[in-house]
Image (cartoon, rainbow, N blue to C red):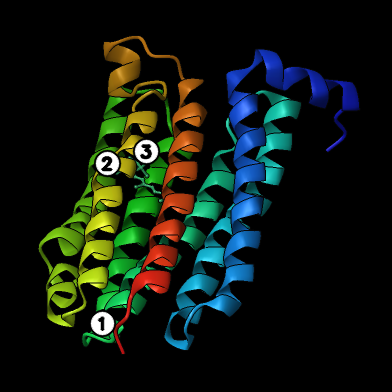
Amino acid sequence: MNTLLTDIVKIPVDDPIAFTFFTGYMAMLASAVFFFMERSSVEGKWKLSLLVSGLITGIAAVHYYYMRDYYLATGQTPTALRYIDWTLTVPLMCVEFYLLTKAAGAKKSLLWKLIAASVLMLVTGYIGEAFTDGSTFHSVLWGVISTVGYVYILYTAWLGEVAQLAKNSGDPVVVRGIQTLAWFVLVGWAVYPIGYMCMPGGWLNVGLGWSASNVDLFYNIADAINKIGFGLVVYNIAVTSKGK
Ligand SMILES: *C/C=C(C)/C=C/C=C(C)/C=C/C1=C(C)CCCC1(C)C
């Protein structure tokens, strides 16, 4: 995109959204480098998990690079790029749950169920955002359907298969790690629907008058916390677990 260098340098200091696009990009890139490099220093059975952490933050870094430019050039929310990023990275986060519980007997079907729930969550969320007519009906309808997918993942992590498998693993590091990831899904992921509800027609937009420009602010902060945080939890499991 043909943005003047002076614009790129100028905008972040007086625009908090641009600021989070810049820091988000840099943080994702640095994290990807970190996870890829550290992959060689962890035990063999954790290497794949670290590779996936590197892919999640690496894919996000590339999308932030483009989203940042898109935002600077147009002042608009880069909805399509955002959802392409999530469609790749959220299933990879499901892969992390699967890899961490595989030794305890996780089956492929668990992975597919989690991926199906994330696809439901993201496709309906995209319809809610990209095809909005500004009405509360549209926003709430697709937001509620999307939340079904979210709640399914939340349930699986806290009480369902993932939680059960973690318990069965007999490895206290894995138990605690999965517990921390479950907290990320409960608290960190809950920031996304808050951003969504700032859209025109959304409950926070209509009810509290929150501006639609807050959408990107919430999404950018949530992405940094969740993608990098998830990766660090996985990294911590890899370096502290003494299991076979
Ligand atoms: C790295 C990206 C992540 C972890 C993205 C997560 C996205 C969500 C949990 C989105 C959830 C949504 C709802 C639960 C309802 C409204 C629409 C969404 C898609 C924002």
User: At numbered mark 1, what does the secondary structure look like: helix, strand or loop?
Assistant: helix
**Separation of disc 3 and disc 2 at Cα?**
10 Å
Cβ(mark 3) to ligand 1 < 8 Å?
yes
Residue 173, placed above or below residue 185? below
Q: Quadrant of residue 187?
A: top left
**Separation of disc 1 and disc 2 at Cα?**
26 Å
The nearer-to-camera label among 1 and 2 is: 2
User: At numbered mark 2, what does the secondary structure look like: helix, strand or loop?
Assistant: helix
Using residue 163 as the reference point, say whether residue 56 is left or right of it: right
Q: Is residue 131 visible?
A: no
**Identity, as a three-letter code, of the amino acid under mark 3:** Tyr
The residue under the point 74% across, 19% down is 11
The residue under the point 50% across, 43% down is 224
Q: Is residue 239 visible?
A: yes
Of labels 1 and 3, earlier in sequence is 1
Using residue 43 as the reference point, say whether residue 72 is left or right of it: right
Residue that mark 1 sits on: 109
Of labels 3 and 2, earlier in sequence is 2
Residue that mark 3 sits on: 192
